[in-house]
Amino acid sequence: MPGLISVVTVNLDDAAGLRATANSVAAPERPPDEWIVIDGGSRDGSIAVIREFEALIHCWISAPDRGVYDGMNRGLRGARGCYVLFMNAGDCFGGADSLARIAAALDASPGVDLLFGGTILALPSGHRLYRPPRTPAHLRLGPPAYHQATVIRRAAHLMSPYDLSLRVSADYGAIATLISRGASSIQIDHPIAIRDCHPDSLSERATACRFGDFVMVQRRILNLGLGSVAAHVVRLALIHCAYRALRKIRRPRHQVFS
């Protein structure tokens, strides 16, 4: 019988990040029912890492794809669990009890479509910021949670896969589509994931594209007016500037932000 939770990891030429994720997957008190690794044809040593942890991996492939969201769609189609969680190379669980907390919350809400959890953002400066989950009402400002802390019922997700035209924010688009179609959701205000905010990550390298994706989601999927979209883009830009300034401060601090 299919397991409850499938964890999918997408990777391309990030052997160090993949190892960190693999160590995290190996650590939980309650392991995933299935772990799938989708590699985009790495040439850096990632395959050696996959083979090292092969006993933990239920299925893996290494082949060229059209980017991270194409890889995530491949993992979604190949998963067998009732729910999927995308923990990509470099991302880690917030603690050894993360999957146990997720499973307990899903057991308490049978058939729920979405679970939003908290995320710790690990900045290059050493800062760690806690981003709590939001309700669907927050969707007009952005996704209620980062994808590392978003658990999605697979049957619903297959009806709304990642749109490859949204190069940086297809996760926002998929969640917006699901909620606009009436998907149910719950929240766990607990750090269930750690997001590695590497300066070479796609979202960091393509800020303008990310802003453009947000406008597309808010206009095309959420049907927001131009005035509302403009206000949200300004807010996003201010948060981005504050985030970049914080990255330059070297003394580690722990903060919570909204």
Image: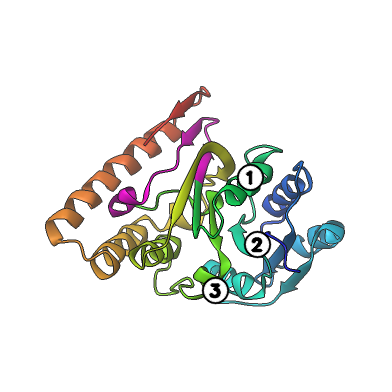
Name which quarter of the figure residue 61 lies in.
bottom right
Residue 97 at x, y percent in the picture: 69, 38
Residue 8's disc number: 2
Residue type, numbered disc 2: Val
- Does the stretch in magenta take in 99? no
Q: Earlier in the sequence, mark 2 or mark 1?
A: 2
Let me know if residue 44 appears in the view.
no
Residue 249 relative to residue 19: left or right: left
Residue 204 relative to residue 208: left or right: right
**Number of callouts:** 3
Q: Give the range drawn in magenta.
A: 117-141
Instruction: Quadrant for the C terminus, please.
Output: top left
Q: Residue at x 62, y 39 (%)?
A: 94
Secondary structure found at label 3:
helix
Residue 241 relative to residue 252: left or right: left
Q: Which of marks 3 and 2 is nearer the N terminus?
A: 2
Depth order, front residue of 251/93? 93
Q: Is residue 214 above or below residue 221?
A: above
Residue 17 at x, y percent in the picture: 67, 51
Secondary structure found at label 2:
strand
Q: Earlier in the sequence, mark 3 or mark 1?
A: 3
Residue 104's disc number: 1
Which is more foreground, mark 3 or mark 1? 1
Depth order, front residue of 168/257? 257
Depth order, front residue of 173/207? 173
**Label 3 to label 2, Cα distance in Å?**
13 Å
Mark 1 nearby-residue class (10 Å; few <14, some 14–19, many ≥20): few
Q: Residue at x 71, y 65 (%)?
A: 36
Residue 44's disc number: none
Residue type, numbered disc 1: Ala
Q: Is residue 55 above or below residue 146?
A: below
Let me know if residue 54 appears in the view.
yes
